[in-house]
Image: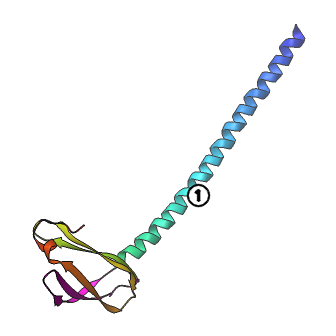
Amino acid sequence: MCEIYTTLRTAALSQVVAIILLILISTVMASILYVFITKHLSAQSMAIEHDATNVKLKIDRVRKAYEDTNWISYEIWMTNPGEVTIHLDYVYLIDPSSDTIVHRYYAGEWSIASGDTQYLWLAIPKIRLKKGIPTW
């Protein structure tokens, strides 16, 4: 009976040591993973914040370019005074009295480089310029 007790006691001690080692290894690995992920995410958010803060678009002039019975077209001149290139895809016309979008215009996928001036030809159906009628 003495042999069994010694064998069980040694086996129980090695199991406790193994569990402690597993907990220690998993804690160290979780800490390394946490530090890596937080540093990686903070570096990405700083890069995004840096690019987003330098985006500027100045509307220089708006001119009615064409009008017929169904459409009104405007020529909108804009300058990019910022430090980064602007990629334009949609233009929204917003009713200032209600802050609602009155017209959404797909401008295509084009860019305005830093310091560049370009114009956009914006065509709006006349029926959609009535108050409260969205265009899509």
**x%, y% of residue 58?**
26, 85
Residue ID at (86%, 18%): 7
Between residue 114 and residue 11, name the one nearer to us: 114
**x%, y% of residue 110?**
39, 83
Q: Name the image quarter holding residue 63.
A: bottom left
Image-based side of 76 in relation to 9, left or right = left
Q: What residue is pinned by disc 1? A: 36
Residue furthest to the top? 1
Specify the quadrant that holds the N terminus.
top right
**x%, y% of residue 36?**
59, 58
Q: Name the image quarter holding residue 103.
A: bottom left
Q: Name the image quarter holding residue 128.
A: bottom left
Specify the quadrant that holds the C terminus.
bottom left
Residue ID at (60%, 52%): 33
Between residue 17 and residue 79, name the one nearer to us: 79
**x%, y% of residue 94?**
18, 71
Between residue 135 and residue 95, name the one nearer to us: 135
**Magenta segment, principal secondary structure?**
strand
Q: Which residues are magenta?
A: 56-85
Residue furthest to the front? 69
Residue ID at (46%, 71%): 47
Image-based side of 9 in relation to 34, left or right = right
- Mark count: 1
Image-based side of 126 in relation to 16, left or right = left
